[in-house]
Image (spheres, helix red, strand yellow):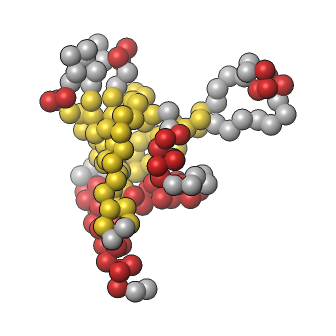
């Protein structure tokens, strides 16, 4: 292992340790399920959508009080370890983390499905070590 790879792993380990020490919770990322080939109801558009929930962690989640919208939408942010994301991206065979997050329907936090507003990645030496997700609670659940 050359020196650049060793230095690139440092921030990832620090982020993992920091997220675990700050609570290290797990949440579920909801992804659409795979279509069944040869199913007549699938071809006609009559099948019920299937979802799979994938556990990711360690994460730190917090509500952003300063950014409650005038319509009552609650905003939150979640910090996710790149180690957890890389593990899921590899096992579910996604091309990249950006495709992984783009395919996600939302994040389930304490039983509430929140939509992903944006994803920001923090990198050092070209290697991601932390993802920051901005989330919004559905309007029906924010009253």
Direction left: furthest residue: 66
In front: 60, or 9?
A: 9
Q: How many marks?
A: 0
The residue at the point 58 percent across, 52 percent down is: 94
- Which quarter of the rendered picture does the N terminus lie within? bottom left
Say if 15 sits above or below 60 in the image: below
- Residue 71 image position (x, y, % from top left): 25, 14
**Residue 33 makes an appearance in the image:** yes
- Residue 13 image position (x, y, % from top left): 32, 68
Q: In which quarter of the image is residue 138?
A: top left
Say if 31 sits above or below 122 in the image: above
- Which quarter of the rendered picture does the C terminus lie within? top left
Direction bottom: furthest residue: 2
The residue at the point 30 percent across, 57 percent down is: 122
Say if 4 sits above or below 77 in the image: below
- Residue 83 image position (x, y, % from top left): 42, 60
- Residue 16 image position (x, y, % from top left): 33, 61
- Relative side of 36 to 51, left or right: right
The residue at the point 22 percent across, 21 percent down is: 69
The residue at the point 68 percent across, 38 percent down is: 34
**Residue 53 makes an appearance in the image:** no
């Amino acid at each position: 292992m050359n020196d650049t790879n060793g230095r690139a792993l440092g921030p990832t380990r620090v982020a993992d340790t920091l997220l675990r020490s700050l609570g290290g919770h797990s949440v579920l990322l909801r992804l659409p399920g795979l279509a069944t080939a040869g199913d007549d109801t699938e071809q006609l558009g009559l099948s019920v959508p299937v979802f799979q929930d994938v556990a990711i962690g360690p994460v730190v989640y917090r509500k952003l009080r300063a950014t409650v919208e005038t319509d009552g939408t609650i905003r939150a942010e979640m910090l996710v370890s790149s180690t957890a994301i890389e593990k899921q991206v590899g096992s579910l065979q996604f091309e990249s983390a950006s495709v992984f997050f783009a395919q996600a329907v939302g994040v389930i936090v304490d039983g509430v499905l929140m939509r992903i507003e944006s994803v920001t990645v923090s990198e050092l030496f070209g290697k991601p070590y932390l993802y920051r997700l901005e989330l919004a609670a559905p309007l029906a659940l924010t009253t």
